[in-house]
Image (cartoon, grey):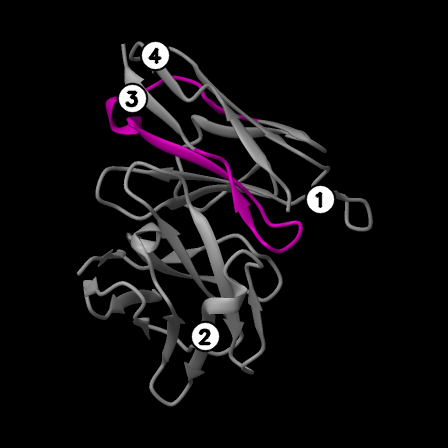
Amino acid sequence: DIVMTQSPDSLAVSLGERATINCKSSQSVFYSSNNKNYLAWYQQKPGQPPKLLIYWASTRESGVPDRFSGSGSGTDFTLTISSLQAEDVAVYHCQQYYSTPYTFGQGTKLEIK
Amino acid sequence: QVQLQESGPGLVEPSETLSLTCTVSGGSITNYYWNWIRQPAGKGLEWIGRIYTSGSTNYNPSLKSRVTMSVDTSKNQFSLKLSSVTAADTAVYYCAGHFSSSSYFHYWGQGTLVTVSS
């Protein structure tokens, strides 16, 4: 299984400031035949299911604000929120879909400082 | 817009079989992979497995011996059975869907809490 490890486990950022969450996979999730990283990011608010934010490591899902961006390749990935808004308080999860079993990171809890 | 809704008992006794159904509305069930994912309270997400509308399945090896998934295209439903449950199987269970060409989860149900207890 590919193990996904996020850092930090929790993060407190001031409104309007940048938030950065990291995700590391135990093996590469880059598929050279199509030049794509099989990595997604989700946002989960309390009592709600996860919501897809980013796929292919850096493609924003339709309707997701452009303050959310994803980067990275191979085994190291980053989710960046450029200017934190109050509604961004949530748990963020990364997921690899390179191979089954699909696996998720342990989640990063983002709060307002 | 495709919507998913889980249904099934919220309480299951230890050693019994957990059974859940997910109903797909707002679109066709065909040409998607349908998944079950669970989340124990305060913990991360665990992928249980998936089924295609043809009936082909992939299960998480950690649960494979206890999991059975099925699909009923005439009812736009798919189902999960997890046998020999213990307290460790207590979790919120989500159904989720992804396109056949890409395995990130576009569609999620609201989730249903299943507690294993006598």
For mark 2, what is the residue?
B69
Magenta run includes residue A93: yes
Whether the residues at callouts 3 and 4 have beta carbons within 8 Å, the answer is no
Instruction: Give, as a three-letter code, the residue at label 2.
Output: Met
In space, the residues marked 4 and 2 are separated at their CA atoms by 42 Å
Q: Is residue B56 above or below residue B33?
A: below
Q: Position of residue B76 (x, y in %)?
A: 36, 81
For mark 1, what is the residue?
A36
- Packing grade of label 2 (10 A; few <14, some 14-19, many >=20) is many
* Helix, strand or loop under label 3: loop
In space, the residues marked 3 and 1 are separated at their CA atoms by 30 Å
Whether the residues at callouts 4 and 2 have beta carbons within 8 Å, the answer is no
- Please report whichever mark, 1 or 4, sits nearer to the chain's N-terminal start: 4
Q: Position of residue B30 (x, y in %)?
A: 49, 79
Left or right: A30 as drawn, with respect to A61: right
Check the residue under mark 4 and report the chain it is in: A
Residue B31 in sight from this viewpoint: yes
- Which mark is nearer the camera, 3 or 4? 4
For mark 4, what is the residue?
A13
Which segment is the magenta one? A78-106
